[in-house]
Image (cartoon, rainbow, N blue to C red):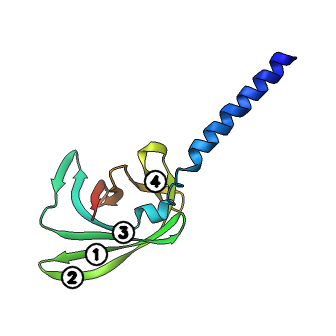
Amino acid sequence: MKKFFAFVLSVNLFFSCVNEKNKDKPPAPEPAAQIAGSYRVTLLKFNGKNVPLNDTDVLFQLDRLSDKVVTGKMKVVLGGKSVPDEDLCNLYLTRAGYAGIDLFDQTEKIGHIDKTNRLHILVIFEGRKVEIVAVKK
């Protein structure tokens, strides 16, 4: 019986030390606050090819709506002229463990933001899957 109490006491002390260490760590930022911002499109991927977009002005602006929801706009400048902004739907966010944050349109996953703050959005254009890669500014 004494061994049992000694075991319980040692387990209790261990977990109290673990909790003390975690007290000093700030909480992880909410997903929406973490990813809100402006992203410049740098690459298109389709048909197994990577097409860099170095000289274009295509931006995704993501704004926090709630802890796990962002709204967005796509802003395009072609030939020095602004094209009307394209409103995006509300994007629902879920953490994907160490991989980053997944973005959903209702229940359909449409992209993710990886640990290096790169935005990856999957779209269907003329029947083909296209991945848009953008880097946070």
Residue corresponding to mark 1 = 75
Amino acid at circle 3: Gly
Residue corresponding to mark 2 = 82
Amino acid at circle 2: Ser
Taking 81 as reference, is 74 above or below it? above
* Crowd tier of the residue under label 1, counting other residues whose Cα lies within 10 Å: few below 14, some 14–19, many 20 or above: some
Residue corresponding to mark 3 = 37
Q: Nearer the viewer, mark 3 or mark 2?
A: 3
Q: Nearer the viewer, residue 44 or 65?
A: 65
The residue tagged with tag 4: helix, strand or loop? strand
Amino acid at circle 4: Asp
Percent across and percent down for residue 113 are 38, 54
Residue at mark 3 to residue at mark 4: CA–CA distance: 16 Å
Quadrant location, the C terminus:
bottom left
The label shown at residue 102 is 4
- Mark 1 touching mark 2, by CB under 8 A? yes
Percent across and percent down for residue 74 are 32, 72
